[in-house]
Image: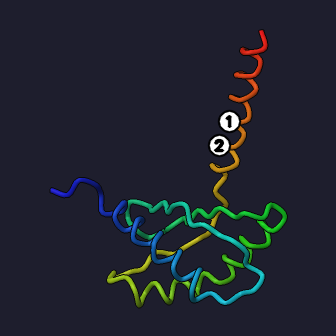
Amino acid sequence: MLPYKRSQRVSDLMREEVADIIMYKLKDPRIGFITVTGVDMTPDLKIARIFVSILEEGERDNTIEILNAAKTFIRSLLKKRLRMKCVPTIEFRLDASVDYGIKMDTLLKKIKDNHEGS
């Protein structure tokens, strides 16, 4: 028996392939530095939510719109790369975990500074 579900294996593969497609095949100059952080698949493999981290704060909403507009192109390339009967419908979402991590780091530093100052 395999150590984890098929949906997890497919999401790992999709994360790698989508990152490669965005980096090398998507030729939109409006897209800045993007990192594909994860893919959440439904158990029936019909929908894939692709989470991306975008470096430039001011361009985040615009970049998500560009990626969602290009999702048919990306999905067509995924059909060629993945050996699946049905390639999932994709949607791009902003990954807020990086911002959350920075916020937590800042709070921990404040606590440490307050504790050392006492």
* Left or right of 68, for residue 85: left
Q: At 60% across and 66% down in the image, what residue appears? A: 35
Q: Which residue is mark 2?
A: 101
**Residue 74: percent from the left, percent from the top?**
55, 84
Task: Residue 18 in the image: state x and y as whole percent.
Answer: 51, 76
Instruction: Look at mark 1 in the image and give the residue it sits on.
Output: 104
Residue 44 got which mark?
A: none
Q: Quadrant of the N terminus?
A: bottom left
Foreground: 110 or 87?
110
Looking at the picture, how far across and down is residue 56, in whole percent?
A: 78, 64
* Image point (54%, 64%), residue name: 49
Is residue 39 left or right of 6 when viewed as pictured? right
- Based on the displayed image, in which of its 4 quarters is residue 79 positioned? bottom left
The answer to which of 4 and 110 lies nearer the viewer is 110
> Quick check: 85 above or below 90?
below
Left of 79 or right of it: where is 56?
right
Position of residue 83 relative to residue 43, above or below, is below
Marks 2 and 1, how far apart in space?
A: 5 Å
Question: Residue furthest toward the right?
Answer: 58
Please rate how many residues cluster around mark 2, counting C-alpha atoms within 10 Å: few if below 14, some from 14 to 19, many from 20.
few
Looking at the rendered structure, the secondary structure element under dot 1 is helix
Q: Is residue 43 above or below residue 18?
A: above
Residue 51 occupies which quadrant of the picture? bottom right
Q: Quadrant of the C terminus?
A: top right
Q: Residue at x 68, y 28 (%)?
A: 108
Q: Amino acid at mark 1?
A: Met
Depth check: give the residue in front, 113 or 60. 113
The image shows residue 98 at horizontal and vertical percentages of: 65, 50
Q: Nearer the viewer, residue 117 or 101?
A: 117
Looking at the image, do the residues carrying marks 2 and 1 touch, with CB atoms under 8 Å apart? Answer: yes
Q: Secondary structure at mark 2?
A: helix
Q: Which residue appears farthest toward the left when viewing the image?
A: 1
